[in-house]
Image (cartoon, helix red, strand yellow):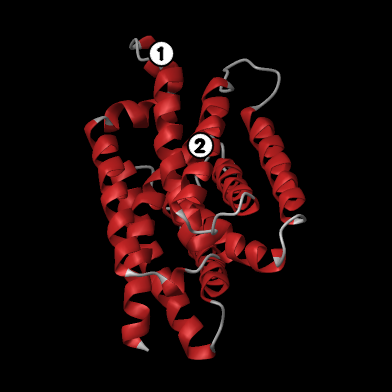
Amino acid sequence: MISLMSLPFIACLILVGIHAYLGIHVVERGVIFVDLALAQIAALGAVLAVLMGFPLCSPQAYFTSLSLTFIGAVVFSLTRFKESEIPQEAIIGITYVVAAAAAVLVLDRIPGEAQHIKEMLVGNILFVDWKHVVRIAVLYSAIGFLHFIYRDRFVLVSCDPDKAAEKGISVRLWDFLFYVTFGFVVTSSVELAGVLLVFSFLIIPAVCAMLFTKDFRKRLAIGWTAGAFTSLAGIYASGAWDLPTGAAMVCCFGLLVIGCGCVKYIISSQKPASVG
């Protein structure tokens, strides 16, 4: 079982590495469901490619998904307004619902749509090969390097866009760059891990880390560590009890956030109450 699970675990480590980092940005921006929205847009692109006669995991499906994801990136970067009457989360929610409904309409025209829906939701990470692992490792390393070089601007635009604007930084431009790189990651990850697991990789380690510290680097360390061990637990549970790998991992991530919430409550309850 160890030999069977080792490659999926390596893939999970790569996914955790980039998603935990991006997840902190997403939570700071208050656009929690942007990942689900972009992931659903990517899934819509994939099923559109299937409708046109291409395999679900083909290069044609990937680039169709990527093209639609870029459109989503443009929309999200242009709808972040400080004093807008409509919160950006509403735009993201509408985008997700419409993309999901459109995917259902497309799937209705594809024979064997149930299998396509399952692959979109939970992916096929158990059957990943070295070629796919190397490809996402190279892509995510390039994106991570870009974010490392311009880390100050990306972090400032996510955490304090007003201060970024005061410094002469184009918030809209850096928003667009963030969502474009985010779109690359989501499109590649959904193809491998599915919508639900990608959302878990992105949000849950970041939320758990943010429960315990406000320091960005410490959040990264906690998110990476928690995500790695939870991925290992999910893969082990899948192999030990013959469970669907993606679904088992998502449930383990759910247990992680519950456990972190309990630990945070215990720590908070032991602090002495402030006087006055």
Figure quadrant of the N terminus: bottom left
Q: Tell me: residue 153, above or below residue 216.
A: above
Name the kind of residue labelled 1 in the image.
Ala
Residue for badge 2: 67
Give coordinates of residue 225: x percent, y percent.
Answer: 33, 63
Give coordinates of residue 150: x percent, y percent.
Answer: 26, 29
The residue drawn where x is 70% and y is 67% is 112
The residue drawn where x is 39% and y is 74% is 232
Q: Nearer the viewer, residue 134 or 247?
A: 134
Looking at the rendering, which quadrant does residue 174 occupy? Answer: top left
The residue drawn where x is 38% and y is 58% is 16
Q: Nearer the viewer, residue 109 or 131?
A: 109
Task: Measure the alpha-carbon separation of dots 2 and 1.
Answer: 29 Å
Question: Is residue 204 something one can see in this rendering?
Answer: no
Q: Secondary structure at mark 1?
A: helix
Side (left or right) of 172 relative to 151: right
Outermost residue on the front side: it is 53
Q: Which mark is residue 253?
A: none
Q: Tell me: residue 10, above or below residue 167.
A: below
Q: Nearest to the eye among marks 2 and 1: give it.
A: 2
Q: Secondary structure at mark 2?
A: helix
Looking at the rendering, which quadrant does residue 86 occupy? Answer: top right
Q: Which mark is residue 165?
A: 1
Q: Which tag, 2 or 1, sits closer to the chain's start? A: 2
Callout 2 environment at 10 Å: few (<14), some (14 to 19), or many (20+)?
some
Give coordinates of residue 14: x percent, y percent.
Answer: 33, 59
Give coordinates of residue 4: x percent, y percent.
Answer: 36, 83
User: How many numbered circles are shown?
Assistant: 2
Name the kind of residue labelled 2 in the image.
Ser
- Dots 2 and 1: beta carbons under 8 Å? no
Figure quadrant of the C terminus: top right
